[in-house]
Image (tube, grey):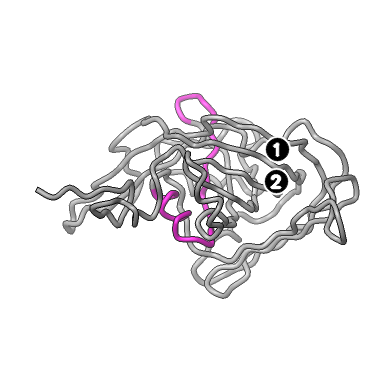
Amino acid sequence: MNTVHGFFFPKTASGASSLVPSPPWRYSGDLLTVEYRTDPARVRELLPEPLELADEDPGAVALIWADWQSCSASGEELLDPVLSQYKEAFAVVRCKYRGETYSRCVYIWVDKDFAIARGLHQGYPKKLGSIHQTRPHPYGPAPRLEAGARFGATLAAADRRLAQTTVTLREPSQTNGFVNAHPMAHHRWLPSIEKGKGLALDELIESGAASFEAGQAWRGDAELELFEAPTEELARLEIREPIAAYYRQVGVVWDGGRLLESGTSGSE
């Protein structure tokens, strides 16, 4: 009897073709975060049962750009950069489950297939997109991480621009914002192969960093624009009031999550 190997498809005799390796997954990244307030009703429509709006600041949103290098425990992907480097942009809101506050990613775009595969496993609703952001550097014209430094970022998908921002750093900060500061409450959904049989996989899960380290966070101001697109709904999280913007360099390890409920549905 043949046995095939690999954490994710395609599974083969050796497992070398698997799109992603087994966790733990390690990340180094530059995060540009813009927080603002929208209509809480627009957040509520993105929260399937049993999730509810957060008690405090229910309309708060974080739109985050991230420039990542990622790898498995061995770190070997870092020496073949096409397997480790990618960018993403994602929208995070907060929600409540059984009295506890969680963060939840409601939209996310990435530019590599392996990042999409990892997201499917973690419950992130990842799609392909085009993401760019200014990189800091200690020499030449690139901005330093210091007061007055200016950073730009753009997001597009299916040939349409969805968001753009310009961030000006003002001062060091104790935090990188509050919207994305909780464990994530995500759903893992997979429709049954048989018509009318609903979901074959239906889980509400909690996940977060197994370990985290970070450099000095910087706080600033942002000019942020969202744009309508035929097949995207990010612009429904309209900007009603800016909160703040942040830049921080981080290191994260992800190594699994915890099942909160199964069969919660909330999906059609």
User: Which stretch appears magenta?
Assistant: 97-120
Q: Position of residue 25 (x, y in %)?
A: 48, 41
**What residue appears at the point 34 percent right and 57 percent down from the top-left corner?**
17
Q: Position of residue 207 (x, y in %)?
A: 47, 34
Queried whether the magenta region covers residue 104, the answer comes back as: yes
Residue 213 location, quadrant: top right
Instruction: State the SS at label 2.
Output: strand
Mark 1 residue type? Gly
Q: Which residue is mark 1?
A: 177
Queried whether the magenta region covers residue 147, the answer comes back as: no
Residue 223 vs 204, above or below: the answer is: below
202 or 207, nearer to the observer? 207
**Residue 11 visible in the current orientation:** yes
- Using residue 198 as the reference point, say whether residue 33 is left or right of it: right
The tag earlier along the polypeptide, 2 or 1, is: 2
Q: Which residue is mark 2?
A: 35
Residue 127 vs 254, above or below: the answer is: below
- Using residue 116 as the reference point, say whether residue 193 is left or right of it: left
Question: Pointers 2 and 1 in contact (CB under 8 A)?
Answer: yes
Residue 129 vs 144, above or below: the answer is: below
**What residue appears at the point 65 percent right and 56 percent down from the top-left corner?**
238
- Using residue 260 as the reference point, say whether residue 246 is left or right of it: right
126 or 231, nearer to the observer? 126
Q: Position of residue 127 (x, y in %)?
A: 47, 60
Instruction: State the SS at label 1.
Output: loop
